[in-house]
Image (cartoon, rainbow, N blue to C red):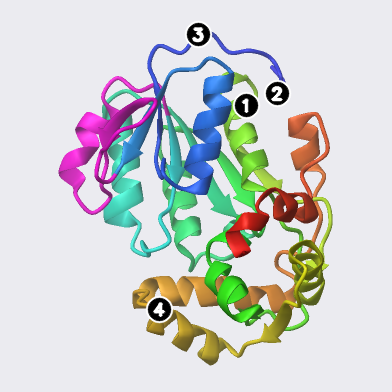
Amino acid sequence: MSPGQALHTLAGPILVTGASGNMGRATLRALRARGLPVRAGLRDGGASEVETVRLDFGRPETFAAAVAGASGLLLVRPPAISDVRPTLCALVDAALAAGLRRVVFLSVIGAERRGYIPHAKVEHHLQGSAAAWTMLRAGFFAQNLGDVYRNDIRERDELFIPAGAGRAAFVDVRDLGEVAARCFSEDGHAEQAYTLTGPEALGFAEVAALLSAELGRAVHYRRASALGYAARLRRQGLPWGQVAVQTILHVGLRFGQAEAVDPTLPRLLGRPAGTLAAYIADHRSLWT
């Protein structure tokens, strides 16, 4: 069967990890719009409009209850986690032991060629398991502007990134959430690895120009060195593992690792992918 054909009714909820993050929220919205049952996995539990369950990757004792009765799993790696074997991979194993088979994993472009990054290790684990997996190998997130870079833009009017003259085909996480929902609600996506990018590759000077035009003030791209970038992340309190992964992914932009525009996302969506300019316009209050 091909993508686009409806699956049978799901017997249990889809467990969404990282439910309080951009990808988790986008996927929850898209799943609910399709009338699918959902369960939000949250480290501290808490109130929500949907069913919630405590899920803490640092506490494996929370895994069994989180996956019990679930019919699908959206797996998102928290940036602070670099050792995926006792965390994400262990959750996959707990899900499979509970009878869950459908897993959609938010990976990154080129994970299949970079075995040293955490995403590649999760992919390898899924491919060797009994899971009916789908890899969403996403490009550079538009939402990085509102998360990782937000304070630098708002407080210093700068993008401080070790990307050199590299370009990125920024992808809107809202589109990724829609694709994830389709993977759970349509047949034909199991054992597929999708490369998902935005519609155009932009250099960071161009990104700064888009921000400047929308915000009405000058935002500049400052080319950071790898060491200078890592040092800033450490001063912000990030753990060494997260610093290393984030620096590696950003330096990779210098070598074109995120500049190719792929047609898969609009094909899966059935519409054009969102642009970076549209994301900035929709979220301008983040930087004011």
Span shown in magenta: 43-72
Is the Cβ of the residue at disc 2 closer than 8 Å to that at disc 4?
no
Q: Is residue 28 left or right of residue 219?
A: left
Disc number lying in front (1 or 2): 1
Label 2, secondary structure: give it: loop
Residue at image position (80%, 50%) is 262
State the SS at label 1.
helix
Disc marking residue 9: 3
Name the one closer to the observer, 209 or 68: 209
**Which numbered disc flags the more N-terminal residue, 4 or 1?**
1
Q: Residue at x 76, y 55 (%)?
A: 276
**Pointers 1 and 2 in contact (CB under 8 A)?**
yes
Mark 3 secondary-structure assignment: loop
- Is residue 49 located in the magenta-colored stretch of the structure? yes
In this rendering, position of residue 25 left or right of residue 257: left
Residue 83 at what x, y percent from top left? 33, 63
- In this figure, which residue is indicated by the disc labeled 4? 236
Residue furthest top as drawn: 8
Q: Callout 3 environment at 10 Å: few (<14), some (14 to 19), or many (20+)?
A: few
Count residues near mark 4 (Cα–Cα under 10 Å), then give few for <14, some for 14-19, many for 20+. Answer: few
Q: Nearer the viewer, mark 4 or mark 3?
A: 4
Tell me the distance, in whole angstroms, between the alpha carbons under discs 2 and 4.
43 Å
**Alpha carbon of mark 3 to alpha carbon of mark 1: how far?**
13 Å
Instruction: Please tell me in which quadrant of the rendered image residue 213 appears.
Output: bottom right
> Which tag is nearer the camera, tag 2 or tag 4?
4
- Residue 151: horizontal and vertical position, in percent? 53, 72
Q: Choose the circle earlier in sequence order: 3 or 1.
A: 3
Q: Tell me the number on the disc at residue 3.
A: 2
Q: Nearer the viewer, residue 277 or 37?
A: 277
* Residue occupying the far left of the picture: 61
| Label 2 crowd bin: few (<14), some (14–19), many (20+), radius 10 Å | some
Q: CA distance from mark 4 to mark 1?
A: 37 Å
